């Protein structure tokens, strides 16, 4: 029996991962926080479920940095980027690290709640540095309950996609 090299290309990863990453990068172009957040969170859950924490981490980092670099995010959100990336990383670690058969919903919800709590807490600190009070209020709202809603909606969307994928193969 021939052993496969650790460097052998996995065709599913070669197709699915760039597709997921592309979705996460393109999502901010849609311009709606709820649609964008749901798509990005779904890609985080799917990549982590299919390929593991390290692949989820790549999706946690690259889209936020890309969106800021090309001007898709308002510059006022720049100080929040490290916290958003950290929140996404925590979501991935909780979701990916708590792999127990049949526990998709509890780990998805726990990951979403912790991500929301971290990002919201960070926003309370960061918004104090924003001079324009109206801008600070907008950032505070964007980084509050919508983070929880989009994490849970992303988890629901990911569940459906993962179920469809499982049936297809």
Image (cartoon, helix red, strand yellow):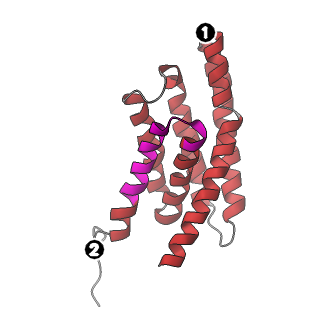
- Give the residue at x 40% y 26%: 71
Between 95 and 39, the one lying in front of the other is 39
What's the residue at 66%, 56% (across, down)? 108
Residue in the foreground of this view, choosing between 6 and 103: 103
Mark 2 sits on what residue? 5
Name the chief secondary structure element in magenta: helix
Circle 2 SS class = loop
Q: Is residue 9 left or right of residue 152?
A: left
Residue 5 in sight from this viewpoint: yes
Which residue in the protein does label 1 denote? Answer: 132
- Cβ–Cβ under 8 Å for marks 2 and 1: no
Residue in view at x 64 percent, y 58 percent: 156
Give the farthest residue toward the top.
131
Q: What range is drawn magenta here?
A: 17-35
Above/below status of 90 relative to 46 = above
Q: Is residue 94 magenta?
A: no
Seen at 57% across and 59% down, the residue is: 96
Under circle 1, the secondary element is loop
Say which quarter of the image contains residue 14. bottom left
- Residue 139 at what x, y percent from top left? 62, 24
Tell me where residue 48 appears, x and y as whole percent: 51, 59
Q: Is residue 131 left or right of residue 165?
A: right
Q: Give residue 8's position: percent from left, percent from top.
A: 28, 71
């Amino acid at each position: 029996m021939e052993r496969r090299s650790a460097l052998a290309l996995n065709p599913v990863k070669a197709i699915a991962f760039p597709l997921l990453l592309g979705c996460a990068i393109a999502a901010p172009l849609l311009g709606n926080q709820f649609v964008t957040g749901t798509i990005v969170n779904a890609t985080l859950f799917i990549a982590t479920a299919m390929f593991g924490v390290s692949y989820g981490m790549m999706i946690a980092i690259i889209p936020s940095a890309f969106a800021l670099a090309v001007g898709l995010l308002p510059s006022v959100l720049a100080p929040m980027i490290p916290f958003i990336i950290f929140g996404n990383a925590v979501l991935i670690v909780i979701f990916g690290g708590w792999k127990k058969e049949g526990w998709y919903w509890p780990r998805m919800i726990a990951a979403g709640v912790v991500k929301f709590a971290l990002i919201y807490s960070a926003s309370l600190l960061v918004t104090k540095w924003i001079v324009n009070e109206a801008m600070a209020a907008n950032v505070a709202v964007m980084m509050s309950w919508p983070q929880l809603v989009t994490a849970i909606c992303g988890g629901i969307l990911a569940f459906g996609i993962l179920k469809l994928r499982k049936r297809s193969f």
